[in-house]
Amino acid sequence: MHSLKNPRDRFLRHAALLLLAFSVFASVFATVLHALEPDSLAMDTILPPLNGALQLCLLVYLYHNPDRLVPVVWTSGMSIIAITCIPVWYSIVRAISTADVTLVEILPPMSSVPVVTVAI
């Protein structure tokens, strides 16, 4: 394992490793919750484990390559944005293309923060 001499760099690396570990935990938790749902969409059973696997790979990669912090953070951020946006875009397209389905009925619950991300 490489050692970083600058305390700030070590702190940033440790913080990123911790956030990646929490992201893996959240993905596993979401995977279990969606697996227990009786009528979950295929997308809900595919995206969380896919994201968890990617975040785990990034965690291992960052652990072994501490100098690659910026690409790991960007990759992780972009994957989280994609995982957030894909279900919303799917719901919007489904509501537009299906006459008997309204957007209010199928839009996944979201806070106001990802709404701005989805609009981009």
Image: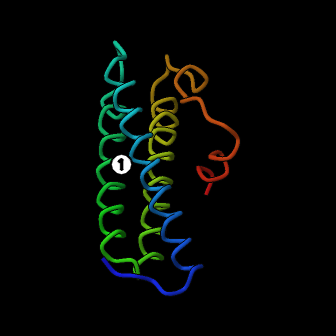
**Three-letter amino acid code at the position of disc 1:** Asn
Numbered-mark total: 1
Residue drawn at (59%, 79%) of the image: 8
Circle 1 residue: 51
Q: Quadrant of the C terminus?
A: bottom right
Q: Quadrant of the N terminus?
A: bottom left
Residue drawn at (58%, 49%) of the image: 118
The vertical placement of 50 against 61, above or below, is above
Q: Is residue 114 left or right of residue 67?
A: right
Q: Judge by depth and name the residue closer to the eye, 49 or 62.
A: 62
Q: Judge by depth and name the residue closer to the eye, 11 or 34.
A: 11
Residue drawn at (45%, 48%) of the image: 23
Question: For the residue labelled by badge 1, is the local secondary structure a helix, a strand or a loop?
Answer: helix
Residue 109 is situated, as x and y percent measured from the top left of the image, at 59, 29
Residue drawn at (42%, 51%) of the image: 21
For the view shown, which residue lies furthest in the bottom direction?
5
The quarter of the picture where residue 31 lies is: top left
Residue 7 is situated, as x and y percent measured from the top left of the image, at 57, 80
Q: Judge by depth and name the residue closer to the eye, 93 or 31.
A: 31
The quarter of the picture where residue 90 lies is: top left
The vertical placement of 78 against 53, above or below, is below
Q: Is residue 8 left or right of residue 10?
A: right
The vertical placement of 47 against 39, above or below, is below
Q: Judge by depth and name the residue closer to the eye, 22 or 11.
A: 11
